Amino acid sequence: MLVFSCQNQISFRISSVEQHKISGSRLNTLWFRVSKWKVNSLQKAAGFPAFSKKVAGISLVNCSYSQSGQPLTNSKAVEKRFSRKVGKKEQHLWSKRDSTGSGQKALNLVRIVSGLPNEREAVYGALDKWVAWEVEFPLIAAAKALRILRKKNQWIQVIQIAKWMLSKGQGATMGTYDTLLLAFDMDKRVDEADSLWNMILHTHTRSISRRLFSRMISLYDHHNMLDKIIEVFADMEELDVKPDEDTVRKVARAFLKLGQEEKRKLVLKKHLGKWKYIHHNGERVRVRRQSWDE
């Protein structure tokens, strides 16, 4: 009985009959293609106790042996093994900005602008010094500073920082525009708000959010500019932006003050029906709207 082994450390025995069949030369090569098999049958034939360990993943085994049963070493007797692929490192096109220390930077910026006079040269000079040693523009810190100043109702400082950011080509987002329009409204700078709105309307025509339209209508309503309210609402209708309930009521009130009762009813009927949907206990519920024609 002949015993031979492979480089996989898998050994089994072959009977004398099988040895006689495969003998005939000093060196013979066996090629086995194995996908998934059990060793039980081989060990039962050889008289060994069977075990059910599965051997899988062996693609091609090349084994060499002599008639004496001794395994031979040959450079061509190589086992081809599957090499495990190393996972590729993911490459992200958009890298997240580092927010480390942005809170302290924001507080420092608030402290700087709070002690500055309302002069363009002094404000811009101090802000340029604040950002001078930064590798990239500290957009996160500036946004946090705007949020802090907005909570403190320091509208002049909000306007200073927002206009400085836009002059640097930074922070041109709907959030920055909304904060700046609110600051213009609170500081009664309607002309500047109107100029900014015209720029936004011509630059970001198809991407203006409903929130920004509502902000502008609220600004004009606050200063009783009825014609401007109707004009902004017409832009909403043209761009197919659906107004919220508060905006609809302001537009209806503007039509009422202008004496255009029919248009007021049409607006209420189109955007403020008798029924509305609310979320109650995690479900969408249809309820009757109170004072829908007011």
Image: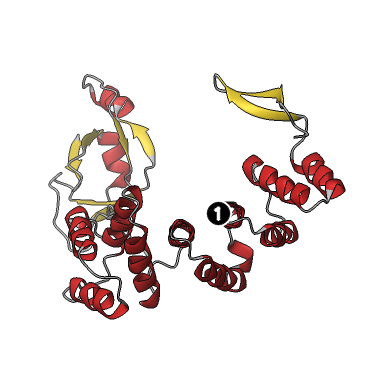
Which residue is the extreme one toward the right? 262
Q: Nearer the viewer, residue 61 or 220?
A: 220
The percent position of residue 272, horizontal first and vertical second, equals: 74, 38
Q: Where 115 sits versus 209, above or below?
A: below
Image quadrant in which the N terminus is located = top left
Which residue is the extreme one toward the bottom? 121
Q: Secondary structure at mark 1?
A: helix
Which quadrant would residue 159 be assigned to in this image?
A: bottom left
Please report the residue visible at 77 percent of the width from the left and 50 percent of the height from the top: 255
Q: Nearer the viewer, residue 206 or 86?
A: 206
Please report the residue visible at 59 percent of the width from the left and 62 percent of the height from the top: 207
Q: Nearer the viewer, residue 188 or 217?
A: 188
Residue type at mark 1: give it. Arg
Q: Nearer the viewer, residue 175 or 154?
A: 154
The percent position of residue 221, horizontal first and vertical second, equals: 61, 53
Left or right of residue 13: residue 174? right
- Circle 1 packing at 10 Å, graded few (<14), some (14-19), many (20+), is some
Which quadrant would residue 97 be assigned to in this image?
A: bottom left
Left or right of residue 219: residue 187? left
Q: Where 252 sits versus 289, above or below?
A: below
Q: Which residue is mark 1?
A: 215
